[in-house]
Image (cartoon, rainbow, N blue to C red):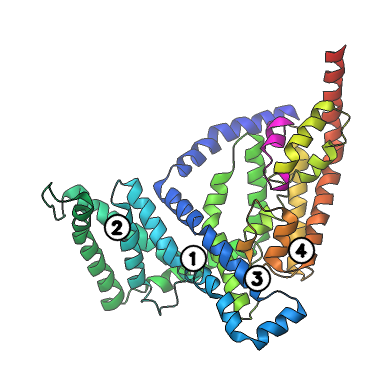
Amino acid sequence: MDSVFDKMTSAIEKYLVPITTKMSQNRYIIAIRDALIATMPLTIFGSLCLMVATLPIPAWTEFIAANPDINTIIRIPFNLSVSIISLYVAFGMGYNLAKAYDLDKLVGGISSAFIFFIMANGVDGGYLGATGMFTAMIAAVINIEIYHFCVKKGIVIKLPKQVPSNIAGSFESLVPIVLTTVLIIVLVKFIGFDVNNILATIITPIVTAAGNTLVMALLYAVLATIMWFGGIHPQILATLLTPGWTIMAAANAEAYAAGAVAEYIFVKPFFFTFVFIGGQCGTLMLNLVMLRSKSKTHRSLAAMALPAGLFNINEPILFGLPIVMNATLIVPALIGQVICVFTTYFAFASGLVPPMVAPDAAVWNIPAFIAAYLCTNSWRAVVLVLVNMVIQGLIYIPFYRVAEKQMVAIENAEEA
């Protein structure tokens, strides 16, 4: 068994680490990641407001129905966050790409939002929400690449050195903005190159597959666990999946707000609330088991790690027990998460648990019991968390007893 895992570790270090390292340093991936992270406070607040407006309490539902103006006011943060999220992404990505090229960041953000408006056919184009996410990204890339090219080649308006830098920077960006605007207007308005429809045709099937394919969910859970075994944080996987998660989360929230069915299952809380309970590798129940361990070391570790584990931060367990590079404990971690992917999918696909109508409300570091209710408005989601915790605990226990026995033997030897 050890030789198998040694070979796996070597393969990870040889083939996977260089790829993930290079991808994590890519300016476009960094810009997408930082832009989406920046929108989180808005989307969380907006989703919470939508949840408040739609609380499944009869008295509250009747009150909202009788007071539509109050309902409209409560939904304002949602309508100005999730419903126009692509605008924020265009600005954020333009800002971060400009930063990567050492250009004027604010100009990069504002001009990217401006170009996105043109590509999205203005504020009435219907692409300001999740539908226009990829259009926003393309707009920012085109805008900043032209901006960078013009500055690099000197195709800019240069003012005397005596002019303040902020004013000089604005004039420096004028030519690139004009060139980008003309290019996009010619493509969109004269040639009829509908960027939105083309992207929707290409990207929508991919997003739909990611949102409703069990294989994709299993692949993510397995790869993340394998990377943890090698001591590699699988953040790059989440970064690659975040644009899809964000689009699907916004689509679910918009559908729910419009009274339609929220269709996407594999949004971010699917993993971080219902599968990665207590953190990736699903260690919360293991942490609780360790509180009654025969090993003094494990009991102390469990007591120290539990407060953070409740908020899905489990590095003390991953590296302290450890699970990282532990051929014994990585097995139940992998099996438990794979089974919980199936149970969670079945619960949502069968309708036993209502759809995740406010996925952005379930931030990854909110305790799973609270996050489960926030993203579904249903106590049945909390029951699902408990069921998955029990499953993970039952799978961990026999494997953990081996590690516990080994630690007790070490403690006894040290005392002797």
Residue 10 screen position, x and y as percent: 60, 30
Report if the CB atoms under discs 1 and 4 are less than 8 Å apart.
no
* Disc 3/disc 1 C-alpha distance (Å): 29 Å
Q: Is 224 a magenta residue?
A: no
Magenta stretch, residue numbers: 309-326
Q: What residue sits 55% from the left and 55% below the top? A: 241
The total of numbered circles placed on residues is 4
What residue did someone put label 1 on? 203
* Disc 3/disc 4 C-alpha distance (Å): 15 Å
Mark 3 vs mark 1: which is more N-terminal? 3
- Disc 2 marks which amino acid? Val
- Near-viewer residue (41 or 357): 41
What residue did someone put label 3 on? 51
Judge from the rendering whether residue 212 lies leftward or rightward of residue 147; answer left or right: right
Q: What residue sits 67% from the left and 53% below the top? A: 366
Q: What element does badge 3 sit on?
A: helix
Q: What element does badge 1 sit on?
A: helix
- Disc 4 marks which amino acid? Ala
Judge from the rendering whether residue 83 lies leftward or rightward of residue 62; answer left or right: left
What residue did someone put label 2 on? 107
Q: What element does badge 2 sit on?
A: helix
| Furthest residue in direction bottom, as rendered | 66
Q: Nearer the viewer, mark 3 or mark 4?
A: 3
